[in-house]
Amino acid sequence: MMKHKFTKVGRNDPCPCGSGQKYKKCCLVKTDNAPGRVKAEYAQKYGIRLKTPADIEKIRSAGNLVIGLLDAVEEMVRPGITTEDINRLVHDHTVDRHATPAPLNYRGFPKSVCTSLNEVICHGIPGDQVLKDGDIINVDVTPILDGVYADGSKTFFVGTPGPDAEKIVRVARKSLHIGMSMVQPGNTVGDIGWAIQQYAEGEGCSVVREFVGHGVGFGFHEPPQVPHFGRKGEGIVLVPGMVFTVEPMINHGKKELIILEDKWTAVTKDGSLSAQFEQTVVVTENGLESLTPFEL
Ligand code: MF3
Ligand code: CO
Ligand code: CO
């Protein structure tokens, strides 16, 4: 989880907009530069680094790789393969594209991808588990390409799903769709979580609280945090150039979780199924663009 830093910028400090000029010569006095002022304000107040069109172009390329990786995984998922097979595919395909898998060695994470089976909510570690007919598995990939990060995940059926699997995957997919539909300038981070929670709980499912969406691009996890629950109108106002993930984790049963001995794997406390879909989005002048676009 990221830590917020609230530091006050002095008149003679470097401007938080990143111009390289002193703050007093830059955004502090520029009345003709509304975007610059917003950039400085978001950096100073929230630690959020708004992205330029050139930054977004690079994150879009990393996002294309996310899609390529998830498509390749989808092709290979079937009963009988192991989660280590998925890890190897994601690792090799990422390196082939001259990119780096961000999960590998991130805070001690030992593999290149997260593979979360059935009651695993997130951060499952690939290994010798064999996929079997009726399982669901979330595969979460984050390549670093040309120095920038894009983050995305999908939950796949292994063979033929039962009714609970069918339901939780449907609700998780639509939760992401509804959360993304709230992304536009002037709405708040709270509007996203509120819409997801209303929908998912209305379907009799629950929303995980401990893990949230996050700013992404220059780093793996940047401010702001994007909860998948909450109240309308609450939190930071969305502005163009914000890049963050929406990635609701939805449980078939109760919302509570347990972290296993490996310190990573999060599982539902009640053993119920959990599913998740994730995309990286950028706030535009009119709404949003997904930088990891796939059908929802
Ligand atoms: N990709 C995850 C996310 O959506 C984070 C995984 S951290 C790891 O934020 F270390 F487990 F890879
Ligand atoms: Co993420
Ligand atoms: Co992710």
Image (cartoon, rainbow, N blue to C red):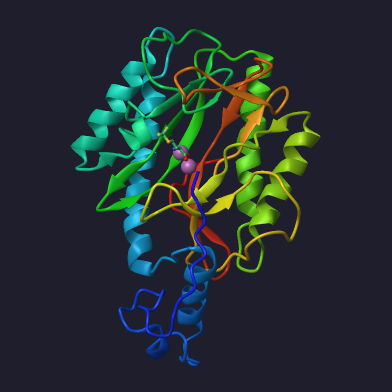
User: Quarter of the image holding residue 173?
Assistant: top right
Residue 45's place in the image compared with 209, above or below, is below
Figure disc tally: 0
Residue 34's place in the image compared with 65, above or below, is below
Camera-side residue of 19 and 150: 19
Question: With 27 as the anchor, is 200 left or right in this view?
Answer: right
User: Quarter of the image holding residue 203?
Assistant: top right
Question: With 273 as the anchor, is 21 left or right in this view?
Answer: left
Which residue is found at the position 44% from the left and 84% from the top? 27
Q: Measured from the top left, where is residue 147 in percent x and y? A: 27, 53
Q: Measured from the top left, where is residue 107 in percent x and y? A: 37, 36
Which residue is found at the position 48% from the left and 17% from the top? 261
Question: With 205 as the anchor, is 239 left or right in this view?
Answer: left
Residue 178's place in the image compared with 265, above or below, is below
Residue 192's place in the image compared with 119, above or below, is below
Q: Measured from the top left, where is residue 281 in percent x and y? A: 49, 54
Q: Measured from the top left, where is residue 96 in percent x and y? A: 19, 36
Question: With 148 as the anchor, is 1 left or right in this view?
Answer: right
Is the C terminus in the top left, top right, bottom left or bottom right quadrant?
top right
Which residue is found at the position 52% from the left and 64% from the top? 6
Which residue is found at the position 50% from the left and 92% from the top? 31
